[in-house]
Each structure stands twice: as C-alpha cells, then as structure tokens.
Amino acid sequence: MREVFQQELAEVQERLVDIAGHVVVSISTAVQAFGESNVQLAEQVIASDPLIDDKAAALDELAIDIIARQSPVARDLRIVVSALRISASLERMGDLARHIAMLARYRFPMQVVPESLQPTFAEMGRHDIEVATLLRELLETQDLSIAERIEAADEHVDRLHRQVFAQVLGTAWEGAAHATVDATLASRYHERFADHAVGIARKVKYLATGDWVGAEPHEHDLEPVQPEA
Amino acid sequence: MREVFQQELAEVQERLVDIAGHVVVSISTAVQAFGESNVQLAEQVIASDPLIDDKAAALDELAIDIIARQSPVARDLRIVVSALRISASLERMGDLARHIAMLARYRFPMQVVPESLQPTFAEMGRHDIEVATLLRELLETQDLSIAERIEAADEHVDRLHRQVFAQVLGTAWEGAAHATVDATLASRYHERFADHAVGIARKVKYLATGDWVGAEPHEHDLEPVQPEA
C-alpha cells in the first residue's frame, strides 16, 4: 500500500511539473505576443489555456481519488491537499497569461502600451517567465534554494509594477485614458502572476520543512499610486 | 462514526457561514468607506482582515483533520475538499474588500473616483454587498435558488465594470491619469469579488446536484476596453 501511495504521489508531482511546463510556455508566448504585438502568438496562448484548465481539473480528480483510496494522514495528506492548492494556483497563472495575451490581441496591430513603457513591461515579462521557469524546476527538484530565487524575482516584478504607475503618473506620460487603463491592467496581471508563484513556492517549502509561512496566494499590499500634485 | 462525521460537517458549514458573515461586514464597510471617503471605516476593514485570514486557516486545519481522522470517501470527501476551496475564495474576497478600503484610505480626504463615476461605483458596491449577503445565506441554507441570484447579481457587476471603462474612455472623462488608474483597479476589485462568489455558488450547487459547471473561481473574459478613435 505504502509503495503504491509513493508511486501515486510521484504521479501527482509529475503532473504538477507538466502543468507548470505549460504555464511556462503560456507566459513566454504571452510576453512575446505583448512585446511584439503578435496576434498569432496571442491566439496560441488563448487557444491553449483550456488544456491547462483540463489538466488541473484532472489532477484534482486524481488527488481526491488518492485521498479516498489511500486515506493518507499527517504529512502525506498535506502533500495531496497542497497539490490541490498548487494546481488551482497554476490554473490561475495560466488565466493571467491569457489575460496578457488578450490585451495584445485586442490592441493589435497597435502595441498595448506606449513606447515609453515597453522596456518596463519587457523586464517585467522576463521576470514572470523566470518565475514560471523556476517554479517548474522547484516542483521537479524540490530544491528549496529555488524558492528563494522565486521570491527574489517576485520582488523585481513588484518594483516594476510600482515603476509602471510612476511612469503613468509622471509628467512625461503621453498615453490616453485607454493606454492608462491597459497599462494598469497589464501591470496587475504581471504582478499577480508572480504572486501566485510565490504562494506555490511557500507551500512547497512548508511541505519540506513544516515551516508554514502563509497558506494563500501571497500578495504584497502595494500602496495605491501617489496622486499628482 | 457516521454521526460524529455529520457533526463535524455541520461544524465546517457553520464556520464557512461565519467567515462569509465577516466578508459581508468587510465589503459593506469597504463600500461605505469608498463611497463616503471615510478613513475610519477603511481602517476598520484593513484591521479586521487578518481575522478572516485566521478563521480561514483554522477551517483548513479542521478540514484536513477531519479527512485524516474520518477518511471520508465519495461525496463526503468532496464536501470537505470543497470547504477548503470555499474558504480560500472567502479569504480572497476579504482581501479584495481590503484593497477597496486601502484605495479609500490612501486618497482620503479626496474621493477615490471623480463625481461622474460615483453613482456607477455605488451601484457596483451595492451589488457586491448583495452578492456577499446572498452567499452567506446560500452557505447557511443550501437553497440553490440563491445561487441563481448570485449569478444574476454578478452579471450586474460585470455590466457596471464595463460601464466604468466606457465612462473613463468617454469624452466627458475629467480624471487625471491617477484617477484612471484608481478607477481601473477599483473596478477590477469589485468585479473579482463577485466572480469569487459565483465560483463558490457553483461549488455549492455541484455538491448538491453533482452537476459540475466549473471548479475554479469564475471569471468572465471581458474584452479589454475599446481604444479611443
């Protein structure tokens, strides 16, 4: 029984790694679609999101089935319950990549954000891709040093999120209201994407160490932006 | 054993109702703080959010403990697993109420949104309060007709969310960039709040009927806003 259970846990882990791999592809493609205003790439992200949803739902079914058949307790049970939570967060990360792609598709052939913001979003996009890539690696290797690197990348994303607002509210901002709306939403999507990765990394760390630092998707309480004088 | 289990399920349900009640208070207070620019009320929401987080975490511990001790299967297991998911969504609804309150606190003594948007946000706020109130009632009574009313209220919120963007992008919009950013974020928070309630309502419905219409927090794919001509 124990051996079967370990095999099933390995299957759960493999599936989480697989879903995380799809999220890496989605965010990488969405960031490229956003940066290059590439509508074909945007369509790819949007079209492939249901696959992530289906894989997450199938994993949830497997996890519930394992609990029902194996009646795990203690740490074993927590691992399976955490898999349910991790799959929900991965599914949400896929949604956020899709939201970024939808902005790109909708504005095509224009860029979503004006020239002046593009370097900031390009950097934020790179960090989101890094976060997803690290997350996949963390889920595969369970190497906890990767969790720290995810937190560090998330801090970059938060800094860039604040920088977007600083630019939008600066005197040099040339965007119309629709560009302000788009930049706000796009920045929020990028920020939440990294937040979910931090939430997952903390769950993985908790399972390994028992050191519970937070159950739910982490979110910094960014102060809202400064009003203009 | 069965009787103990039923008592424990009743305890889980009571706790969900209790947390939902706190979410009703939070969103009601946040909406009032936002509408009246009342910093004391905003502080109340912000200060009380950790209580919701703690209650959700305690409920999760109870649910995991029930699974470990009682080894429920089939529908019983799904009820307990759903409680974990519902508590995560309630916790997130509390966060979104806090975000709305933080905008009000940050802009105080100014209003977060200009005069022209206040009726729209007031209406959106009323629907969010309605959604939370109905959700609490649904969790308490398991009366599935309430789930339909939650979906209907969410549709109002989505309509108002689109209306905010239409106003921000209209020619009569007098807001500066910071008002555009704030209105965008505030509208997104109101919209996501109702989305989570719909997600919970669908889980409750699923448990009662076995008719699975969606596992994860529901979100409409609102098309991004129209660029100005």
Image (cartoon, coloured by chain):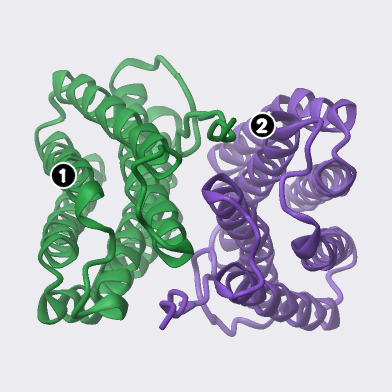
Chain colours: A purple, B green
Judged left or right of residue A83, residue B94 is: left
How many numbered markers are drawn?
2
Q: Residue at x 56, y 28 (%)?
A: B223
Write down the residue under mark 1: B119
Q: Secondary structure at mark 1?
A: helix
Judged left or right of residue B12, residue B73 is: right
Chain for numbered disc 2: A
Name the spot of residue A196 as percent of width and height, x first. Answer: 62, 61
Q: Is residue A100 above or below residue B210?
A: below
State how far apart marks 2 and 1 are (Cα).
37 Å
Image quadrant for the C terminus of chain A? bottom left
Chain for numbered disc 1: B
Q: Is residue A68 above or below residue A13?
A: above
Q: Quadrant of residue B164?
A: top left
Write down the residue under mark 2: A53
**Any part of residue A224 in sight:** yes
Name the spot of residue B69 as percent of width and height, x first. Answer: 40, 57
Mark 2 near mark 1, Cβ–Cβ under 8 Å? no
Judged left or right of residue B169, residue B15 is: left
Binning the other alpha carbons within 10 Å of mark 1 as few (below 14), some (14 to 19) or many (20 upward) gives few
Judged left or right of residue B13, residue A16 is: right
Q: Is residue A81 above or below residue B55?
A: above
Q: Do discs 2 and 1 belong to a common subunit?
A: no
Q: Secondary structure at mark 2?
A: helix
Q: Residue at x 57, y 52 (%)?
A: A185
Q: Residue at x 42, y 47 (%)?
A: B85
Binning the other alpha carbons within 10 Å of mark 2 as few (below 14), some (14 to 19) or many (20 upward) gives many
Name the spot of residue A170 as percent of width and height, x first. Answer: 59, 76
Name the spot of residue A221 as percent of width and height, x first. Answer: 46, 77
Q: Residue at x 19, y 54 (%)?
A: B115
Give amino acid for label 2.
Answer: Asp
